[in-house]
Image: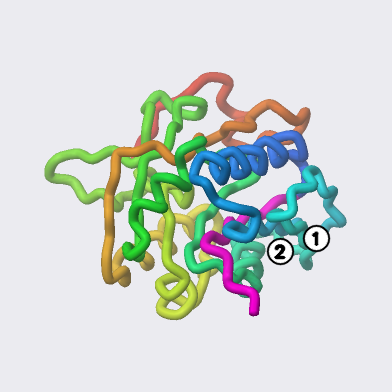
């Protein structure tokens, strides 16, 4: 009887960034090697939003799914992918981001923690080097200070207690879902280890930048 993979990596894509997506997939493969994980330990689910998207890599841990068009910043695709995922732990990786080589090794140190919050490198997008920033007297979970890439979550937390990924208006979905997970988690670990690179694939695909990337030619300060 086949066992469930340890990690499910959830990646929505509009199909506009095949080079960046390939880079994201390669980063997962490198992180698997660094953590000593075999091909059965990870499933990476790439969900194309309403298109017949290309299979940009042929690693056995990657599945490409052509899903009905949602058009809501990847939120509907995340929910669909969560429903078919099988991993015990969930990682959200957008198609223009990447894992660090040590990401899965870091998460593997906390097998019994429902929500692991780690740092990500955001220097390609903002003047602030890392998120989340821990500021004395301020809540860690505040707008612009957390990103799905910062987290590794248990399936029981995400699917059973929180019902997957709720769809709110626009970009607000990220923050509101992460707050739900944080508030309902039975155990939380916060580490300063760096597990992700935000905007790692920026500029790899002509015409593949999102609106924020198009509007900023240099890193900008994060403001609340």
Picture disc at residue 27: none
The image quadrant where one finds the C terminus is: top left
Instruction: Give me the residue at 31% from left, 72% from top.
Output: 184
In the shown orientation, is residue 46 left or right of residue 101?
A: right
Between residue 23 and residue 124, name the one nearer to us. 23
- Residue 72 in percent (x, y) is at 64, 59
* Mark 1 secondary-structure assignment: loop
Question: Magenta part of the protein: which range?
Answer: 1-14
Check disc 2: other Cα within 10 Å, few if <14, some if 14-19, many if 20+. Answer: some
Question: Is 144 placed above or below 42 here?
Answer: above
- Residue 33 in percent (x, y) is at 57, 42
- Residue 68 in percent (x, y) is at 78, 67
Nearer the N terminus, badge 2 or badge 1? 1
In the shown orientation, is residue 165 left or right of residue 131?
A: right
Query: Is the C-beta separation of discs 2 and 1 under 8 Å?
Result: yes
Residue picked out by circle 2: 70
Residue picked out by circle 1: 50
């Amino acid at each position: 009887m086949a066992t469930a993979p340890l990690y499910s990596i959830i990646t929505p894509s509009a199909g506009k960034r095949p080079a960046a997506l390939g880079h994201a997939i390669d980063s997962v493969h490198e992180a698997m090697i660094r953590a000593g994980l075999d091909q059965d330990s990870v499933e990476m689910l790439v969900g194309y939003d309403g298109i017949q998207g290309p299979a940009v890599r042929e690693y056995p841990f990657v599945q490409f799914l052509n899903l009905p068009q949602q058009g809501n910043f990847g939120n509907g695709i995340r929910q669909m992918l969560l429903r078919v995922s099988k991993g015990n732990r969930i990682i959200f990786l957008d198609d223009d981001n990447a894992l660090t080589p040590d990401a899965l090794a870091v998460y593997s140190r906390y097998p019994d923690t429902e929500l692991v919050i780690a740092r990500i490198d955001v220097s390609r997008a903002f003047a602030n080097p890392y998120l989340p920033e821990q500021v004395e007297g301020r809540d860690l979970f505040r707008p612009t200070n957390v990103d799905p890439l910062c987290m590794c979550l248990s399936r029981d937390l995400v699917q059973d207690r929180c019902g997957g990924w709720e769809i709110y208006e626009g970009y607000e979905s990220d923050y509101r879902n992460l707050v739900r997970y944080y508030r309902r988690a039975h155990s939380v670990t916060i580490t300063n280890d760096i597990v992700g690179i935000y905007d790692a694939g920026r500029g790899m695909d002509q015409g593949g930048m999102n609106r924020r990337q198009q509007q900023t030619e240099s890193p900008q300060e994060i403001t609340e």
